[in-house]
Structures are given as structure tokens and as C-alpha cells.
């Protein structure tokens, strides 16, 4: 076998293409550009994740149970019994005022009263979160998760009867949903005692974080 001498290798020349300043600028811009702005063939594609049977069943149940919980009063009670024992025991329910407005009604039952036969402060406070969260869940739909971030309740006077929660959002819910992103929304709630004069017994300000379930699934995967 013939050997190639070092002088022969050194004598060979290799043509290296010259990189102009314009080409160097294009390469630097492409390297610093966000992935979403690159052509489809140059993007890094994440391999598809194959979900397990358990995860697919869980996602299916999550969607259908969420839709059932806001369908009617019967399914609302069933879902409350399974996932919100406090809501089921207190008996809070929603009543339609007009086409797009609901109020939450907290019955004056023994579970919600304290030892001197007035509505318990803990019952009014805890059910204000349930009332606000359920109100937003009905407005946003089953494709969103609603989590309370901050709750400020002010007790004004004793409640000696059924309590009614009236919710008023500070932001436009439909406008926030149109963006398709997660957002924070603040509810102003007035708590009144049902009767001829509807005495105000409390005032609540609650901030909720609303997230599309598709975002939660994407982060989990």
C-alpha cells in the first residue's frame, strides 16, 4: 500500500468560501431570532408525547364533569357532594336574575349558624370564595380553571337570615377570554340578608386567576 507523504498533503490546497459582512449579519440575525419567527423547516420540533391510558381517561372525565357541574342544579349538587363537601353541606346554590346574571343564595340552615342563631362568620367567608369561583366558572366555561388568589371580607353586621351574594366583575370577562390567555380578574361581592329591606351584612373583594386547561396540560407535559 502506498503512503501519502506529508509534503503531498501540505501541498494540497483547500478552497474556503469567503464570508461577506452581509452574510455574517444574516447568520447573526437568524441565530438571535425567536423560534416562532423562523421558517417551519428550521424550527426545533418537540417530539410528540404519547399519553398514557390513565391520563386520557382523566382528561376525558375532567372535561365532561366540568360541563355537567354547570348544566343544572341536580348535577351541581352531585359535583358539590363529590368535590366540594363544604358547598354541599352549606346548601349554597345559584339563582338566575336575568339572562347573564346570577346570584348565590346561602340558606339559613343549622350547619351555617353559630351558637347565638346568627349566620356564622366562617360560613359567610368560606362561601364567598365558592360563590365567586362558581360565578366565574359559569361565565368562563368548562375549558378553564379558576383559582382564588386573594380574598378580603369585611363584616358589617350580623346576618339573621338567608344570605345573598351579588357579584360584579371589575374587568370585562368576555374581553379577557377573547385573548385566549391566562388572566386575573377581581370580583366585588355584596352580601345582603334576604328580606324586605335586604340589609347589607358584608362586603367582599376577591381576585381569581383564570387559566385555560390547554395551558395547564401543556405545562404538565
Image: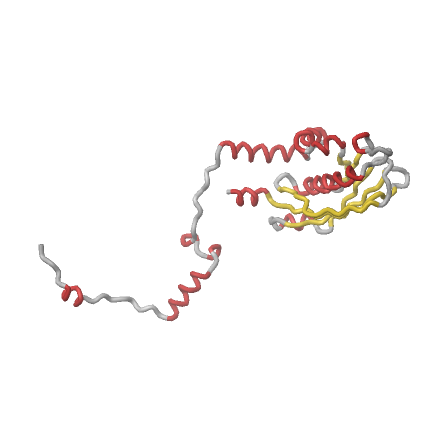
The residue at the point 65 percent across, 40 percent down is 141
Q: Which residue is drawn at 43% across and 61% down?
A: 31
Percent across and percent down for residue 215 are: 56, 45
User: At 38% from the left edge and 67% from the top edge, which residue is drawn?
Assistant: 24
Indicate left or right for 64 with 41 as reference.
right
In which quadrant of the rendered view does residue 159 lie?
top right
- The percent coordinates of residue 39 (x first, y second) are 43, 55
Q: Where is residue 139 in the image (x, y as percent from the top left)?
A: 69, 42
> In front here: 219 or 167?
219
Residue extending farthest to the bottom is 21
Q: Nearer the viewer, residue 53 or 201?
A: 201
Residue furthest to the right in view is 196
Q: Is residue 135 left or right of residue 116?
A: left
The quarter in which the N terminus is drawn is bottom left
Above or below 13: residue 121: above
Which one is nearer the viewer's eye here, 114 or 90? 114
**Picture quadrant of residue 165:** top right
Amino acid at each position: 500500500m502506498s503512503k501519502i507523504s506529508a509534503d503531498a498533503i501540505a501541498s494540497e490546497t483547500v478552497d474556503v468560501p469567503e464570508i461577506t459582512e452581509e452574510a455574517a449579519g444574516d447568520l447573526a440575525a437568524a441565530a438571535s431570532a425567536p423560534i416562532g419567527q423562523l421558517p417551519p423547516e428550521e424550527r426545533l420540533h418537540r417530539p410528540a408525547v404519547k399519553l398514557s391510558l390513565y391520563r386520557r381517561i382523566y382528561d376525558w372525565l375532567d372535561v365532561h364533569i366540568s360541563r355537567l357541574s354547570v348544566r343544572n342544579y341536580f348535577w351541581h349538587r352531585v359535583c358539590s357532594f363529590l368535590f366540594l363537601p363544604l358547598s354541599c353541606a352549606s346548601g349554597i346554590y345559584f339563582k338566575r336574575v336575568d339572562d347573564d346574571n346570577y346570584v348565590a343564595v346561602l340558606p339559613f340552615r343549622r350547619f351555617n349558624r353559630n351558637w347565638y342563631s346568627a349566620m356564622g362568620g366562617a360560613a359567610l367567608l368560606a362561601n364567598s370564595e365558592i360563590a365567586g369561583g362558581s360565578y366565574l366558572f359559569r361565565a368562563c366555561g368548562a375549558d378553564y380553571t379558576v383559582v382564588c388568589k386573594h380574598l378580603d371580607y369585611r363584616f358589617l353586621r350580623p346576618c339573621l337570615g338567608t344570605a345573598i351574594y351579588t357579584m360584579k366583575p371589575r374587568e370585562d370577562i368576555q374581553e379577557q377570554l377573547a385573548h385566549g390567555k391566562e388572566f386575573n380578574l377581581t370580583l366585588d361581592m355584596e352580601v345582603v340578608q334576604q328580606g324586605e329591606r335586604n340589609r347589607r351584612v358584608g362586603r367582599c373583594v376577591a381576585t381569581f386567576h383564570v387559566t385555560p386547561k390547554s395551558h395547564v396540560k401543556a405545562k404538565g407535559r
